[in-house]
Amino acid sequence: MAERETPVVFLHRVERRYQQGDATLEILKGAELAVWAGQSVALVAPSGSGKSTLLHITGLLEHPDSGEVYLDGEPTSGLSDAARTRLRRNSVGFVYQAHYLLPEFSALENVMLPQMVRGLSREEARSRATELLSYLGLAERLTHRPAELSGGEQQRVAIARAVSNVPRLLLADEPTGNLDPRTSDHVFHALSQLIRASGLTVVLATHNMEIAARMDRRVTIRDGLIIELD
Ligand code: ADP
Ligand code: MG
């Protein structure tokens, strides 16, 4: 049998339930998903179906109740908290619906900081941050603070920050969900260019069918399982 490459993400029999008073909400009931290097996957499912839960589990922010999350073929359930944090910091970038930029810092500094935490020098971090922000069309906004940026600009800074440490995997949770349609389109365009140029592996939750249509694959969550669309 021919050997296949290892998926960047492999979710195996992932279960997650929440206790809500007397009721148990079964959100994931044995979800399976393999994402290959360089693939972009849109996760399109109704609100409340478990998209954020799935992304948090994939990004090691949350533990599944059972099942395994493999990153680059390595099981993650046995890792210590410190090892999980290290792996997340080194391998995963997150973009959320809200930007969560640090309000006291400029766009440039917001993109430099994660790199400096990772151990890069100020100059290396500055150079990469400048390059990324320029690539995303923000060359004229480097010294602006988040409050001095539009919603679309803030989200582009958040994207630059998420990829600043060259993650293996980018997880985006409705990244354009708070933006008007035109701005959303602009931000998604910048994101997809970046994805294509960098060969990033991406899982992106969205309600926007046009955005979903431009990804390599589309999946949904149905009855706690991941189902391939088209
Ligand atoms: P989505 O992102 O698709 O809107 P979520 O993953 O955020 O869905 O949530 C899935 C379901 O799980 C929702 O019904 C939500 O209320 C519930 N849920 C999520 N997190 C928790 C939690 N920490 N405690 C209890 N219920 C939760
Ligand atoms: Mg959500």
Image: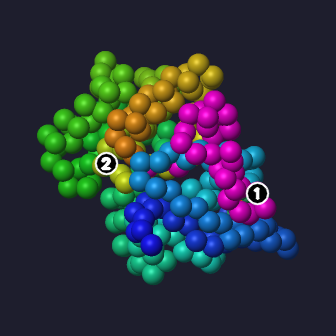
Residue 154 visible from this viewpoint: no
User: Left or right of 52: which side holds 76?
Assistant: left
The answer to whether residue 144 is above or below residue 28 is above
* Amino acid type, label 1: Arg
* Tag 2 secondary structure: loop
User: Left or right of 207: which side holds 155?
Assistant: left
Going from N to C along the chain, the mark reached first, 2 or 1, is 2
Residue 219 visible from this viewpoint: yes
Image quarter in which the N terminus is found = bottom left
* Residue located beneath label 1 in the image: 222
Q: Classify residue 158 by image quadrant.
A: top left
User: Left or right of 220: which side holds 67?
Assistant: left
| Of 141 and 196, the residue lying toward us | 196
Residue 133 at x, y percent in the picture: 32, 29
* Tag 1 secondary structure: strand
The answer to whether residue 3 is above or below residue 109 is below
Q: Which mark is residue 166?
A: 2
- Of all residues shown, which one is farthest toward the right? 22
| Of 191 and 219, the residue lying toward us | 219
